[in-house]
Image (spheres, helix red, strand yellow):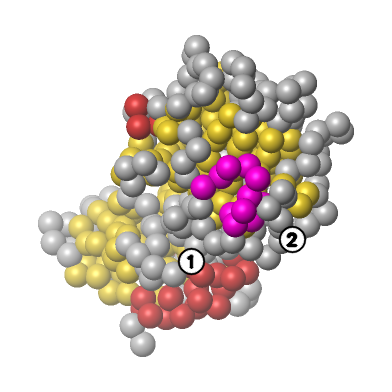
Amino acid sequence: MHARAILIGAAACLAPLAAQTYATDFESLNASAAGVIITGQDQYYIPVAGSLDGLVVTYAGNTLGVPANPNGGNNFYAGISQLTLVYARAQRPVTLPANGVVHVEFDMLCNYMGTGTPSNNIGSFSLQPSATATYPNLLARWPVGAVFPPPTFDADLVAGPGAGTQGPVGDPAFQNLASNVWHRWGCTFDLTAGTYVSFSITDGSTNVTTNFTPPTPILLPNPGTTPVTDFRFFTGGSENLFAIDNFVITYGANYDTFGSGCAGSNGAPTLAGNGYPTLGSAFTVTLGNLPLSLGFMATGFSNTTAFGGGIMLPYSLAPQGFPGCDLLVDPIAVQFLVGANNSATWTFNIPNNTVFAGTAFYNQGVSLDSVPAAAFTNGGGGVIGL
């Protein structure tokens, strides 16, 4: 069987255990036209005493004036703040990596339910606990000087350092979004680096999707020291409506190198990823500094143990005749590579199937040489994302 086929087959078995994602369209929850509280359903709870409950509402006949979502089913989530500045909150546990890249996407609609001057903030998605964990905060706000009825809102963020500062994403596509229209908002963030990685918005009025990667990293709020445990939907201000549908949080694509290689006749061969491993893509890794432009790529699902846990990694290859070299990954699949100009490329055709989202894999390259007969690259570790 082809090495990539072996890898995909093994990933299919491991992915459901690795993904640790959460998605909901609220279809399985109790709902009504006036709204049924979400607290007590699907592990949602009120995180701050005195907060209002979020609601699960039916599109059909809903009393909030929310239009049907072209991509929605029967139900949606809604949080509504009161005139007396009493806010709505709904929080739920979620299992995410202590470190790594995470991606969140959801349909959202913002509207003002009052008759006076609208006040901020409209609503937000955030990871929790905000006081002790590094967390993202996507924040919908009325533009400065908004008056009744507010025709547009902005999809902003809270950026670090420290507790954070509210501000724009940095692309005009995230501003002046039509009120009472369903838009789709997305963000990828790196909990290891403590940064926002990228943003996306699909304008529901135009159906145009804009992807934005900041030219310089934007810090997440609060350089925390404890793991993320929950996410929160928040509705603030006064008489604001913040609605959500088709919510998904999962691992974002990531690829980083680790460890070190060992020298061959031309020095140590190198390994470097090209872009990120996303669903439906052809992700490539380049082996460089190959004297004969020939090599192998070993790929597996662990960089701590190999051969069914029989050996611990890194494992010294000196007894095998390669002093100074270490095995860094579990070699479940090994593929022969023929390249040119002292490099070769490994390609991983990733199926466009969400069962693979969150699957972690590891690479190490082997350079065929003359003296010594082989040299080993550093390691690479990736996570398949959306």
Which numbered tag is attached to residue 30? 2
Q: Is residue 23 above or below residue 193?
A: below
Task: Say if the magenta span includes residue 42.
Answer: no
Specify the quadrant of the image occupied by residue 295. Answer: bottom left
Q: Residue at x 51, y 47 (%)?
A: 67
Q: Is residue 228 left or right of residue 203?
A: right
Q: Is residue 55 above or below residue 16?
A: above
* Residues at discs 2 and 1 in contact (Cβ within 8 Å): no
Q: Residue at x 17, y 57 (%)?
A: 342
Is 68 in front, or is 37?
Answer: 68
Q: Residue at x 50, y 73 (%)?
A: 11
Task: Say if the magenta span includes residue 66.
Answer: yes
Q: Residue furthest bottom?
A: 1
Residue 343 makes an appearance in the image:
yes
Labels 2, 1: front one: 2
Tell me the element at label 1: helix
Within 10 Å of the Cα at label 1, are there few (<14), some (14-19), or many (20+) other Cα atoms?
some
Specify the quadrant that holds the C terminus. Answer: bottom left
As measured in the structure, the alpha-carbon distance from the residue carrying label 2 to the one carrying label 1 is 26 Å
Q: Earlier in the sequence, mark 2 or mark 1?
A: 2
Q: Identify the magenta region.
A: 57-67
Which numbered tag is attached to residue 354? 1
User: What amino acid is at disc 1?
Assistant: Thr
Within 10 Å of the Cα at label 2, are there few (<14), some (14-19), or many (20+) other Cα atoms?
some
Is 118 in front, or is 345?
Answer: 118
Tell me the element at label 2: loop
Q: Is residue 22 left or right of residue 144?
A: right
- Give the x, y percent position of residue 89: 74, 38
Specify the quadrant of the image occupied by residue 293. Answer: bottom left
The majority secondary structure of the magenta stretch comes to: loop
